[in-house]
Image (cartoon, rainbow, N blue to C red):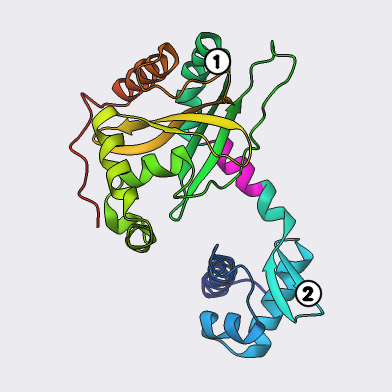
Amino acid sequence: MATRTARDTTAESSSSIQTVQRAALILDSFTVSRPHLSLNEITARLGASKATAHRYTKALRAANLLRYDDRTALYSLGPQVLTLAAAARAALPIVTAAEPYMDRLVQLAGQTVVLSIWDGESPTVVRSADNTDHLIRISVRVGSRLDLATSAQGRVFCAYLPPDQVPALGKLLRRAPELRAELDWIREHGLSVNSPSENGLHTIAAPVFEGDAIIATMAIVGTSVDVPRQADSPMAEALLEITRDLSQRLGNNGAPHAEATA
């Protein structure tokens, strides 16, 4: 009987590592701005032959990590990615740290409270705490991506993130110069208030800092009747108090100087 040598074991280990690296490279090729890719694009990203790329996409499809549209001949991320993303978000330290503060705010404000993080392009909701005492409940789906310019949480991130971490900020400011004054106002008051006319909801959002860097935003979401627009309302003050308490727990000793916008 043939015996396995250390060289054989090392070769198999290297091959397994390369397989994982290549699969991760393919999945990482998909972005919000490029959610669909052709096999040629995946092949170029992989830096291998088309046959190799096809073999990997076939395996990823079998694992529901990729989908293939016969009509367009394009690949996109599969449903299993959503399951993995939800599990990853649930395990984020900021979610665990923020939970008791969010629950406390729900009791104080009587409204839905939402926590979002920055995903590199926009805010993504990682936890939503509803007020179960209301006859009509407002729920915000975990995993929702919020608009950068029109959402209160998006504007908070624009105000406090370094400009080079918000690729779309320069274009937004050129398209809507009034946004610059809004970001200055947010930095002055420490929160953003927003009432999108299309859905009748009102949101108040404030930053959460870890050390001197913004790590998340916390927001109160309710109807325009239930959530006041005033920055000095009891509800806004409760939001500021709780986000500052959470930030202090995460090592922030006071709001940092905001980065200058692009």
Q: Residue at x 59, y 80 (%)?
A: 42
Q: Quadrant of residue 211?
A: top left
Q: Nearer the viewer, residue 123 or 39?
A: 123
Rendering coords of residue 63 (x, y %): 75, 61
Q: Nearer the viewer, residue 89 or 105?
A: 105
Q: Secondary structure at mark 1?
A: helix
| Outermost residue, left side | 257
Instruction: Give left or right: position of 183 versus 140.
Output: left
Residue tagged 1:
106
Which disc, if any, is residue 72? none
Rendering coords of residue 236 (x, y %): 41, 19
Rendering coords of residue 156 (x, y %): 37, 39
Instruction: Give left or right: position of 235 versus 24.
Output: left
User: Mark 1 or mark 2: which is in front?
Assistant: 1
Q: Residue at x 36, y 20 (%)?
A: 240
- The magenta span reads 84-91
Kind of residue indicated by mark 1: Val
Q: Residue at x 26, y 35 (%)?
A: 187
Residue tagged 2:
69
Q: Quadrant of residue 53?
A: bottom right
Task: State the predominant SS element of the stretch in magenta.
Answer: helix
User: Few, some or many C-alpha atoms within 10 Å of disc 2 (few <14, some 14-19, many ≥20)?
Assistant: few
Instruction: Give left or right: position of 6 versus 251.
Output: right
State whether residue 45 is above or below residue 204: below
Q: Residue 160: in sight, yes or no?
A: no
Kind of residue indicated by mark 2: Asp
State whether residue 93 is above or below residue 86: above
Q: Residue 151: in sight, yes or no?
A: yes
Quadrant where the image shows the N terminus: bottom right
Q: Compare marks 1 and 2 and give the one earlier in the sequence.
A: 2
**Label 1 to label 2: alpha-carbon separation:** 43 Å
Q: Is residue 174 magenta?
A: no
